[in-house]
Image: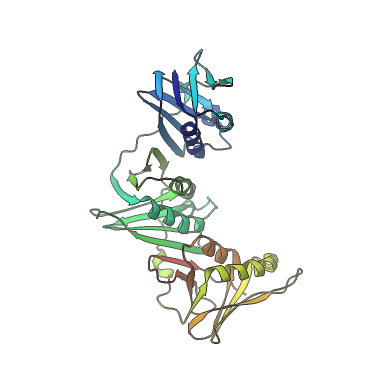
């Protein structure tokens, strides 16, 4: 194998496929990136056996070939080069020679034959979605998925497509985020799946930096394929049935409060300092004089009560919630203002961005 390529393109490729490298791999070859020179392209692949990411760049290929290179080492090394062009060659089968104008480096590799075969997805359903729309949907939902894998379906993000509408939903049973969006083309029929939240989060890192207009999504019975620009991401799906969550969403709130995301977040951060000693429990009290009072109970470190200006429709109301769950939605929702709906202290709080009907966030109340 021998080729010349752009250092900048090489660095980009390595950084992207590195997202599939796990820190606790049991097989040494899984700590490596498969690099394959073929035609006028240089292909990169990495996998942790649950997620696989592939990427390609243009290259001046003088001799085709393939090898696997230690991911952390080659990525760190290339980031420290200053040349615009880099020469890569394999000298004796398992040694990569990296040459620039001022340096020559040899890196020990593992044979490409030992690298796992990345599965080909037998696509049964496919659709396109604008990259920006998918990126926003990921940002506004994936944080609500459970980090506890003991209930696998809750550690994933539910994706459903029906006609020209797509939904992404995540929940850990204490809070839930749902985002709806329109597809460019209407799909015949309907289908759904559960994608591991780690996969969705990694896809979000890719879409947030991609200049590609659309993302192509393909689904089989047990796999999902994302294509965006030069990137392909393949992941397994989670088996199981996602909870029938729609029934827990209150139809109408007795109290509706509109509040600035920035102002409420600042108050919540202060009150949260004192709520940590009490499982992040805070009280929200909405009053007809246009105030939302945010308070913590007294703990051994103290207590805090603060207020923020609101627009209120309905009766005075109050509810106890997890402050971190509130801060999460304020951090990730793409809006300047939100509307909080409350019924009573035993019913979920419903949070929506103002002037948007495509998103809803539910937080279960705390018993006090």
Q: Position of residue 140 (x, y in %)?
A: 46, 59
Front-lying residue, 78 or 342: 78
Vertically, is 187 above or below 360?
Answer: above
Is residue 298 among what the camera can see? yes
Q: Is residue 282 left or right of residue 39?
A: right
- The relative height of residue 257 versus residue 130 in the rendered view (above or below) is below
- The answer to whether residue 297 is left or right of residue 111 is right
Viewer-side residue, 348 vs 311: 311
In the image as oriented, which residue stretches furthest toward the top? Answer: 92
- Expressed as whole percent of the image width and height from the top left, the position of residue 316 reads 53, 85
Q: Is residue 109 left or right of residue 113?
A: right
- The residue lying at 40 percent from left, 63 percent from top is 244
* Residue for point 45% across, 23% down: 4
Which of the 4 image quadrants contains residue 74? top right
> Which residue is at the far right?
300
Colouring: rainbow
Residue 150 in the image, given as x and y percentages of width and height: 53, 51
Q: Is residue 48 visible?
A: no
Q: Is residue 352 left or right of residue 294?
A: left
Q: Position of residue 201 (x, y in %)?
A: 48, 49
């Amino acid at each position: 194998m021998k080729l010349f390529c752009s250092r900048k393109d090489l660095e980009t490729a390595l950084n992207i496929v590195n997202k599939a490298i796990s820190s606790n791999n049991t097989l040494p070859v899984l700590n490596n990136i498969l690099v394959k020179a073929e035609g006028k392209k240089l292909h990169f692949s990495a996998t942790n056996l649950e997620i696989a990411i592939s990427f390609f760049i243009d290259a001046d290929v003088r001799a085709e070939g393939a090898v696997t290179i230690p991911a952390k080492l080659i990525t760190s090394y290339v980031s420290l080069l200053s040349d615009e062009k880099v020469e890569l060659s394999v000298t004796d089968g398992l040694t990569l020679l990296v040459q620039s104008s001022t340096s020559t480096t040899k890196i020990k590799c593992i044979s490409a034959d030992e690298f796992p075969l990345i599965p080909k997805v037998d696509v049964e359903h496919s659709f396109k979605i604008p990259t920006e729309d998918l990126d926003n949907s990921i940002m506004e939902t994936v944080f609500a998925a459970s980090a506890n894998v003991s209930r696998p379906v809750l550690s994933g993000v539910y994706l459903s497509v029906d006609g020209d509408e797509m939904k992404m939903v995540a929940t850990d049973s204490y809070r839930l985020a749902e985002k709806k969006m329109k597809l460019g083309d209407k799909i015949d029929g309907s289908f759904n799946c559960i994608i591991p939240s780690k996969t969705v989060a990694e896809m979000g890192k890719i879409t947030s930096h991609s200049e590609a207009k659309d993302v192509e999504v393909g689904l089989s019975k047990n796999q999902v394929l994302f294509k965006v620009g030069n990137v392909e991401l393949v992941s397994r799906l989670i088996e199981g049935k996602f909870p029938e969550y729609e029934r827990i969403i209150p139809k109408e709130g007795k109290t509706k409060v509109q509040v600035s995301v920035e102002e409420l977040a600042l108050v919540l951060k202060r009150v949260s300092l004192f709520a940590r000693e009490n499982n992040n429990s805070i009280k929200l009290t909405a009053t007809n004089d246009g105030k939302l009072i945010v308070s913590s109970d007294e703990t051994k470190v103290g207590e805090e009560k603060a207020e923020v200006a609101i627009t209120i429709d309905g009766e005075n109301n109050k509810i106890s919630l997890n402050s971190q769950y509130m801060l999460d939605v304020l951090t990730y929702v793409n809006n300047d203002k939100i509307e909080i709906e409350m019924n009573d202290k035993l019913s979920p709080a419903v949070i929506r961005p103002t002037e948007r009907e495509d998103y809803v966030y539910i937080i279960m109340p705390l018993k006090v």
